Image (cartoon, grey):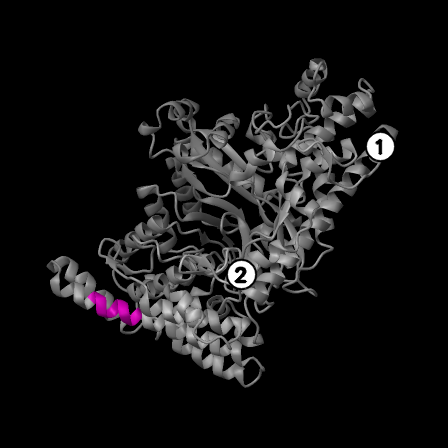
């Protein structure tokens, strides 16, 4: 039995949250530890015996607690959630129509408060609010978790002294400095950049190495203490630690509620280190706005040009109003940061999904054409919305499609809320309850509505494929009447067998999304407005009064999976083809008129309706991008897009020859990084289908 399980079962009469806290205490006392002088930080990591796992993996993986190689009778939230699924819901998940819930999600903990007040400061807050709320188990679990953090710090302090006694002079100095810092943090407030980083990284790694969030904002004052070059060396060690442990999203720059820019010398040095090392982790995003300095734009453009696919750019001028429409005031909307890949949280104040679910709109259109039949399973799995051949106008057909989308939304939200309930019941998280504001004050767990904001986020697949298919149907079936609906239905159901003429007609139809075609752009707006607005009718289990479900689009690695389960589509795509749109932009290869037309098409979406990351991915030729003119052209393009309502840009700077050769000779391209969708990764490590999707994306010139 591992240390966590031993602690969990120590007192059978305890509530679940106290059992988890006792597990963390025992885990802190017994886990194997070491300190790598190259990184210069005390961190919890996965050892050679694979014993150390992130908190959510230890208890929330859905398989139960392993005791002596057997699954114990205590099961986790995933087990209980799976029992709630109907057979039809399982089919809809299996054929990639949708999914909902299933895991606890990423987070952006309040590391800024941690390094300012320490664990002792949290103890004072807990005792203050214990007098107000009847939640003793909740608070007891928090105190045990704080004790676990202090125990780990003390064990690392002693280890650092032991290592210093037998190390070289250079390494001994590093170990002694670690010991000196851990004699203070995380129990007490940090006193300089090194101690702040020690406190942050110890708790960050104990929490499962998730998303640091607004790192340059809450670390900026500490970075100003002492010598900048010395602090930059500390930062390099941290970045090596991030890289080795697969840290998630770190956010740079941005604005406050008065639109003051938050960039600093720390912002610049982080960008410099990203460019220097080209690590693919952490996934770095950068917020821009009306007052972003020119030096920030220029440095970001240069780093993107290095080929690391980072930073992704987010527009405060769209994201903040989108959040404020949910009832989040400007003082908090301007604290947004990305967690995981592209999803949006309020730093240290929210539990807003990632990921609550996902819906393939192209699959919903398939059901509108087939009256509920899945072309992958060859059986009816969705609701019957009526015979499309009886539709006399495009508007009537569009109503069939909308009913299918609404059905998918209702099922996805239901799944998500059942998962949220299971997580709240069986996997409360005392550590994140400490690190997310609201949980102490309310006396509620992180997963039971404790955070200040508890909205939900449902992602999207197949957006541009749906738009293009609807545009083809409108044009050929209803406007020109070149094709009957019966012919269309037959062609789709039979994957264009014997109807190559229709396949070619649909595929060559020039009014594809991404080419700034007015009729197609209008359809795009109608598709997105309907879907996102319908989502916002539903509330989360985490907060059934104010927790609103919003939409986003961050397809990253799943595009090919969705394509494999999707029948033929009316934009000229064969059944089970992996090539679906990888972002809110065009289907790969369908944007023929350059990047300006792509962004003009995307401006037709009302992107303030997107309450989660709404990713536009573009690919540029490295030879033309990496010049002074190229940088200036890209910055002008990005500013124009953002000024006209764009939320996000993710950029790949590469060349097609390298991508093609990397497939043949991967051993020569270990350092070739690409932006996948929500993160960057070595191209040669990707699934072959995903590699092909990236290659197929249109290469633009700036």
Kindly identify which residue carries mark 1.
387
Whichever of labels 1 and 2 marks the residue nearer the N terminus, that label is 2
What residue lies at 56% left-to-right and 56% top-to-bottom?
A: 78
Write the start and end of the magenta stretch as one range. 153-160
Kindly identify which residue carries mark 2.
76
| Residue 508, above or below 432 | above
Most frequent secondary structure within the magenta stretch: helix
Q: Which of 87 and 657 is in front in this view?
A: 87
Q: Going by the picture, which residue comes out furthest to the bottom?
A: 131
What residue lies at 55% left-to-right and 51% top-to-bottom?
A: 343
Magenta-span inclusion, residue 155: yes
Is residue 522 among what the camera can see?
A: no
Residue 207 appears in which quarter of the rendering? bottom left
| Residue 102, above or below 504 | below
Q: Which of 70 and 139 is in front in this view?
A: 70
Residue 132 appears in which quarter of the rendering? bottom right
What residue lies at 35% left-to-right and 43% top-to-bottom?
A: 279
Q: Nearer the viewer, residue 591 or 290?
A: 591
């Amino acid at each position: 039995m591992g240390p966590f399980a031993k602690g969990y079962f120590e007192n059978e009469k305890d509530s679940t949250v106290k059992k988890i806290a006792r597990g963390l205490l025992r885990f802190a006392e017994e886990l194997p530890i070491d300190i790598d002088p190259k990184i210069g930080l005390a961190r919890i990591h996965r050892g050679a015996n694979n014993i150390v796992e992130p908190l959510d993996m230890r208890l929330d993986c859905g398989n139960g607690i392993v005791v002596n190689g057997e699954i114990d009778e205590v099961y986790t939230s995933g087990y209980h959630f799976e029992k709630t699924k109907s057979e039809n819901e399982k089919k809809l998940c299996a054929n990639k129509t949708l999914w909902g819930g299933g895991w606890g999600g990423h987070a952006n903990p309040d590391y800024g408060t941690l390094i300012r007040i320490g664990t002792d400061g949290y103890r004072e807050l807990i005792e203050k609010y214990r007098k107000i709320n009847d939640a003793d188990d909740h608070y007891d679990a928090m105190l045990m978790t704080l004790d676990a953090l202090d125990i780990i710090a003390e064990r690392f302090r002693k280890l650092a002294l032991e290592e210093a006694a037998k190390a070289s002079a250079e390494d001994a100095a590093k170990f002694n400095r670690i010991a000196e810092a851990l004699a203070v943090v995380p129990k007490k407030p940090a006193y300089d950049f090194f101690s702040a980083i020690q406190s942050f990284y110890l708790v960050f790694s104990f929490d499962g190495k998730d998303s640091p969030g607004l790192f340059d904002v809450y670390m900026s004052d500490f970075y100003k203490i002492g010598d900048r070059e010395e602090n930059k060396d500390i930062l390099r060690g941290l970045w090596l630690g991030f890289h080795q442990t697969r840290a998630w999203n770190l956010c740079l720059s941005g604005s406050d509620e008065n639109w003051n820019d938050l960039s600093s010398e720390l912002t610049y040095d982080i960008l410099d280190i990203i460019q220097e090392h080209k690590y693919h982790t952490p996934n770095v995003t950068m917020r821009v706005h009306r007052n972003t300095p020119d030096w920030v734009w220029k440095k970001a453009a240069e780093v993107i040009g290095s080929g690391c696919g980072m930073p992704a750019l987010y527009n405060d001028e769209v994201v903040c109003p989108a959040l404020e429409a949910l009832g989040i005031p400007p003082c908090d909307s301007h604290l947004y940061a990305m967690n995981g890949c592209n999803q949006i949280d309020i730093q240290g104040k929210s539990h807003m999904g990632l990921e609550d679910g996902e819906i393939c709109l192209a699959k919903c259109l398939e059901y509108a054409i087939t009256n509920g039949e899945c072309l992958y399973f060859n059986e009816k799995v969705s609701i019957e919305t009526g015979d499309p051949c009886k539709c006399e106008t495009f508007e009537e057909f569009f109503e069939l499609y909308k009913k299918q989308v609404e059905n998918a939304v209702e099922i996805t939200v239901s799944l998500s809320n059942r998962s949220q309930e299971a997580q709240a019941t069986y996997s409360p998280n005392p550590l994140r309850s400490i690190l997310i504001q609201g949980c102490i004050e309310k006396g509620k767990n992180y997963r039971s509505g404790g955070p200040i904001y508890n909205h939900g986020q449902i992602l999207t697949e197949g957006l541009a494929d749906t738009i293009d298919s609807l545009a083809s149907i409108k044009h050929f079936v209803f406007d020109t009447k070149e094709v009957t609906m019966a012919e269309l239905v037959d062609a789709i159901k039979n994957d264009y067998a014997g109807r190559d003429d229709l396949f070619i007609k649909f595929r060559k139809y020039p009014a594809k999304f991404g080419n700034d075609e007015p009729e197609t752009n209008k359809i795009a707006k109608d598709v997105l407005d309907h879907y996102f607005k319908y989502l916002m009718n539903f509330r989360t289990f985490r907060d059934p009064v104010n927790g609103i479900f919003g939409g986003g689009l961050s397809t990253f690695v799943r595009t090919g999976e969705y394509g494999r389960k999707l029948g033929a589509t009316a934009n000229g795509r064969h059944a089970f083809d992996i090539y679906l749109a990888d972002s809110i932009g065009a289907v790969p290869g369908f944007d023929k008129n350059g990047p300006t037309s792509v962004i003009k098409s995307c401006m037709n979406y009302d992107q303030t309706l997107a309450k989660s990351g709404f990713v536009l991915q573009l690919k540029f030729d490295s030879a033309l991008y990496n010049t002074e003119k190229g940088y200036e052209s890209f910055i002008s393009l990005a500013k124009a897009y953002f000024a006209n309502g764009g939320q996000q840009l993710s950029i790949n700077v590469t060349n097609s020859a390298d991508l093609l050769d990397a497939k043949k000779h991967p051993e020569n391209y270990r350092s070739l990084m690409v932006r996948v969708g929500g993160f960057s990764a070595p191209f040669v490590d990707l699934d072959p289908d995903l590699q092909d999707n990236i290659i197929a994306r249109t290469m633009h010139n700036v």
